[in-house]
Image (cartoon, rainbow, N blue to C red):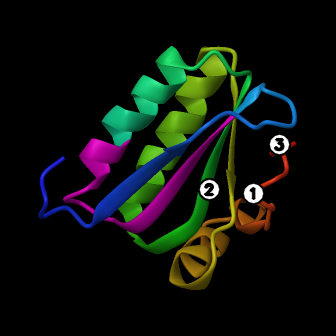
Amino acid sequence: MSSNLALVLAFLPPSVRSGRTERVAITGEVDLMSAGELELRLRRVIAQSGCRTIVLDLGGLEFIDARGVSVLLAAKLAAEEAGRDLQVTNAHGSPARVLRLLGFESWCQRVDAGEDGR
């Protein structure tokens, strides 16, 4: 990933509790410049993960624009098509305000890192 992108993705191992959940932490900013990279990585995780549930943890996300929201929605649909459950959680601050305005209140639900996202 080029160093000029504000997006940093941290892939965390599947949940130790169930072994059926893969958690992806998204931090920084998801905007027009970084959304393409995020989309590629999420598609790769969805295609390659052996986990039934994939949790996108937005706890470290500082900013998201319309293109970023579009990428999250596309990932949700791609996961459904692949027979996986993609959950989006932990948005707060400015990203949470954007998501709430768009009707995605559940994406702002706080989930502890130890939970399996269900």
Residue 79 shown in magenta: no
Say which of 116 and 65 sits in front.
116
* Residue 67 in view of the camera: no
Are the two marked residues, 2 and 1, in contact with CB atoms closer than 8 angstroms? yes
- Above or below residue 97? Residue 70 is above
Outermost residue to the front: 16
Query: Mark 3 packing: few (<14 Cα in 10 Å), some, or many (20+)?
Result: many
The residue singled out by tag 2 in the image is 57
* Residue 108 in view of the camera: yes
- Above or below residue 69? Residue 79 is above
Q: Which residues are magenta?
A: 22-38
**What residue lies at 70% left-to-right and 60% top-to-bottom?**
107
- Residue 61: horizontal and vertical position, in percent? 49, 70
The residue type indicated by label 3 comes to Asp
How far apart are labels 2 and 1 at the CA level? 9 Å
The residue singled out by tag 1 in the image is 113
Query: Mark 2 packing: few (<14 Cα in 10 Å), some, or many (20+)?
Result: many
- Above or below residue 99? Residue 39 is above
- Whichever of callouts 2 and 1 sits on the residue coming sooner in the sequence is 2
The residue type indicated by label 1 comes to Ala
Quarter-wise, where is residue 64 in the image? Answer: bottom left
Q: Nearer the viewer, mark 2 or mark 1?
A: 1
The residue singled out by tag 3 in the image is 116
Residue 26 shown in magenta: yes
**What residue lies at 87% left-to-right and 37% top-to-bottom?**
17
The residue type indicated by label 2 comes to Asp
Q: Secondary structure at mark 2?
A: strand
